[in-house]
Amino acid sequence: MDVEDILRLVENPVTIETPVAMEMLNIHKGYGQNFGYVMYRCNQTIPTGNHTLTFTSMPLDRAQVFVNGKMVSTLDWKNTNLSMTLTEASLNQQENRLDILVENHGRVNYVQAGYNYFNEERKGINGDVHLNGNTLKNWTIFPLEMKQNLLQGALESKAWKSNKPNADSPTLCTATLHLSEKPKDTFLKLPGWIKGTVYVNNFNLGRYWTIGPQQTLYVPGPILKKGNNTILVFEQHKMGEEIVFQDTPILS
């Protein structure tokens, strides 16, 4: 399932003039979004040519920048350059679409030097986004909390495709694990996958990332069942070919 099909499952997209952090979204009775991913889509199209895209502050915690559904840059702890060049090679249409997927990596829960990190952290895009010095306006924000309703909606969707989506683009994949005996604890490995989150029977198993050090996810026996077990993988970059269950972990 490609990113467009995923976004169609979001029940409460927010239309806003300029981007705000996920906690500031007018959802959940004003309490905003607390976890997961958030997709920012600029409804102001970008003309073809070479342009400079600039963030006024670092998106938290990790941002992937897409043009026409293809990733052109990533901002994270390895790349903190808030200014990037969008080339004519990627802006190959008369009107080009800009999407920014931001991932919340988690929160701290302590006070240090009088600063309450837990209450003050703001995830997502904090500040304006500029194109050639001009503020981009008119955005649609899709909260991707990956809750039960979205996961179940994905499983029931008719949008599943057997063909592979575009490389280096967010993808939701599904698989079935059939158990003929009573389930036991096991470990899940994703060879060839890059970064994302795994859900087993709609239970959030955790994140995976090739940079490690951990290369397997622990799968407790009680979340499995005899018969068919549903696996959903939200891959942020490039999907792999297989999912492997094994009896030992790889922790380094």
Image (cartoon, grey):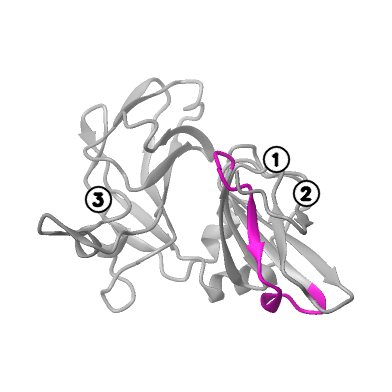
Instruction: Say whether residue 185 is magenta.
Output: no
Q: Are marks 2 and 1 in contact (CB under 8 Å)?
A: yes
Q: Position of residue 88 (x, y in %)?
A: 46, 20
Residue most toward the left? 114
Count of numbered labels shown in the rendering: 3
Q: Quadrant of residue 96?
A: top left
Q: Is residue 73 visible?
A: yes
Residue where numbered disc 3 is placed: 18
Q: Which residues are magenta?
A: 210-228
Residue where numbered disc 1 is placed: 192
Nearest to N terminus: mark 1 or mark 3? 3
Q: CA gap, disc 2 to disc 1?
A: 8 Å
Nearer to us in this view, 20 or 218:
218
Q: Nearer the viewer, mark 1 or mark 3?
A: 1
At x 69%, y 61%, the residue is 159
Q: Which mark is residue 242?
A: 2
At x 47%, y 27%, the residue is 91
Relative to residue 7, is residue 30 depicted above or below? below
